[in-house]
Structures are given as C-alpha cells and as structure tokens.
Amino acid sequence: MKITRRNFVGGVAGMAGLSLIPTRGFAQAKAPSAPVTITVVDVAGNLALTQGMFENYAAAKPEWVSSFAFTKAPAPELPSKIKAQQAAGKVDIDLVLTGTDALSAGLDQGLWVDLSAHKASLPNLESILLPQAFKMQALAKDQGVVITYYPSGPLIEYIPERVATPPKTAAELLEWTKANPKRFMYARPANSGPGRTFLMGLPYLLGDSDPRDPVNGWSKTWEYLKALGENIEYYGTGTTQVMKELGEGTRDIVVTTTGWDINPRVLGIVPAEAKVSTLEGFHWVTDAHYAVIPKGVSEEKVAVLLDVINFILQPQQQAIAFDEGYFYPGPAAKGVTLDMAPQESQDAIAEFGRPEYEDWIANNPLEVPLEPAKLVDAFRIWDEQIGASKG
C-alpha cells in the first residue's frame, strides 16, 4: 500500500467543535478586531505534520484567521533573510516552523520574539508536554514553543540484499566504508535532521571526553568524521536527496532516524524491505520542531499566533502529527495515542512502522541536542573541516 501526502482537513467540522471547548491548561484570549492572514515559513518539513492543524484552526476560528499562507525554505538561508527584513523594517514572515538548526541560528542572532512576556497567553508547557519534549523546550530559551517531538536517532538504514551483514559498531561502519567506497552517505548536518543527529550522536558512540562540547570535547568525533569522509563521494544537501539515492541504489547504507526510516518507505522512495539498526553503545539524540515568531511581527498578529499555538498543542490536534511516520511518533503533548490519529496515519504506521522501536526507545539513553550556541559551533566546524573537503 502506498499512501500519498495528504492534508488532514476531512471532518474539520467535528474537530473544530471540539477545539472551541476550553481545555484545561490552555490559555484563552480575545479575538483580533478583524481576521488576519498569517504567513508561515517551514524550514524543517514540519508542515507534513502540522498543516492540517493550521487549516483546522482557520476553519474553527474564522474570526481570528482569514487564511494561512504556507511557504518552505532551506534552514541555513532563512536567518539572513529575516535579519535583512528586520533591518529594513518590513518583516513579512509571521511564523517560522523550525528544527534546532534555524532555532539556534536565530537565537545566536537575536531574531526571535521573547515569549517570556507572553506566558499568560501560552499553555502551561511543563504540564502538557511529554517530559523529554519539555527538556527540548529548554533549548528555545523562551523564544519558541515545541510543537512536535521524536526520539530521532542516530540509526543506520540499509538494503539487506546489498548489505548482508550490517555494521554493529562505529568502528565496523568505518571499516565497511573502506571496503565499499562511495556506498555510504549522510547529508550536511546544518540542513538535515538525520545529519545533525548523527553528528551529535557520535561523541556518545565513540566515548568522547565531553559529548556536550564540540569545540573542546569531540577530538575522537572529528577524527572519525575525517576518516569516514575519505570513503564518501559527497555529502547530500538535504535528507531527501540521501533517501532517493538509497532507493535508487546509488548508496547501500545511509544515516537515518525513526521518521526518515518510516516515511520514505510509506511514500515509495525507499524500498519497503529496507532495514534499520543501531550501533553499539548508541544514545538517542532527541529532536523537536518549534514555532518561533520573528521580531517585527505586529502585536496583533503575535496575539493571534499565541492562540494558534494553544490550539495546535491540544491533544486532538496533536494526533495529526503521527502523519505517515515522518517524525515518528510526532506528538509533543501528553495523552496523544495512535488510535486518535487519522486512519491514514494508523494504516501507514501499521504497515511500515517497526516493532523494535518501542524497545529501543525504552532501553537506550535519551539525550537532548546541544545548546544552541554549541550547535552553531558544531555546524561551523563540520562545514570547515569535513564538508569543505568535498567542495
């Protein structure tokens, strides 16, 4: 069964009715003087999980929002674009959906609205977010809100007919790449969730001196990545490219995460028979997507956006985040189960999910990603020392 990407808007009327019922723990606000149009830029692939939530909001609360305008952009390019708009005094991006990459860059450059002054208009995040998702919330420094979450990786994915015995340790992976040059691939970490998860997971796998300090504590990691790079043809510009090359047979092993394992198989990009495995001693490096508001957005729109965030964090909306496994599981809020998700999501995960994930998530350490400034350092060093070697 092949399921194509869909916007879950069916049954909006029923869900909208539920959404208008005040929910304990969520803030209630006053409608704007007239409905507004909200421009949303996605640099994380998050709309695959949340577009249905935004469209449900527009249907449920037409007195707040007349429409959402959705666009997508590469994460590394967005901060400079927003900074230029802010310098010109004309910010036309109302909401950014981002992973830790552009979140960190924006924190570093002071691009995002500080939401600490708006806590009364936001839900009690500690009470509604999953514990590990709330740990991810700390990375936002009060300048964003976690809206989706998953344990992520790093995992390796391979095609069994081409890799009869997959590597079981980081050392074995390096040896496999030496014996099979150009058959392993991952994408530039600054523009790839699996790429940055692999980057941040290696210090745990390799026993580096300080997994939280890429500048002074990753000597083994940087040495390993340089050695690995000798056997890599080039680094993908994004994860989609990596998965296409795995599916087309150009690569035999790639770096992946739970969601990037499930979803490309749902969509037929990667063969259904592809397998995943962990490397000995691995720690999950968790991941999340955030809603952040650029400085320069009008106060009226900020008030609407805070109401939107309240809405999409409610359990009946969060269930849409199961999607087709793209960010598996996906919901950031407590009390959201697969049986609450759209039937298409339930069917996709029943067919393409992996029963071993439950055990792996329960029995391996869960680590939060690097602090934003440290992540910026890690991206810079990778670009200069690793990526630059391939142009």
Image: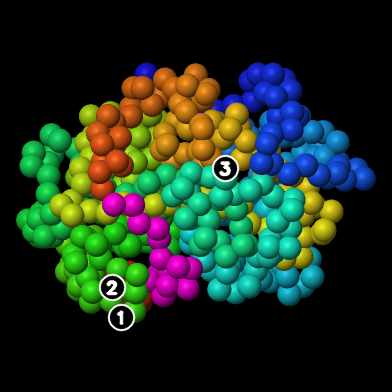
- Please, is residue 87 above or below residue 293 in the view? below
User: Which of the two discs, 1 and 3, sits closer to the camera?
Assistant: 3
Which residue is situated farthest in the right direction here? 33
Looking at the rendered structure, the kind of residue marked 1 is Asn
Q: Is residue 324 left or right of residue 36?
A: left
**Residue visible at 42% across and 20% down?**
347
Q: Residue 293, position in %: x, y? A: 68, 58
Residue designated by label 1: 216
- Magenta span has 367? yes
Identified at 29% across, 59% down, the residue is: 201
Which residue is depicted at the point 9% across and 55% down? 172
Question: Where does label 2 land, which residue?
Answer: 210
Residue toward you, 154 or 38: 154
Q: What SS does tag 3 mark?
A: helix
Which residues, given as a range, are shown in magenta?
Answer: 365-380
Nearest to N terminus: mark 1 or mark 2: 2
The residue carrying mark 3 is 128
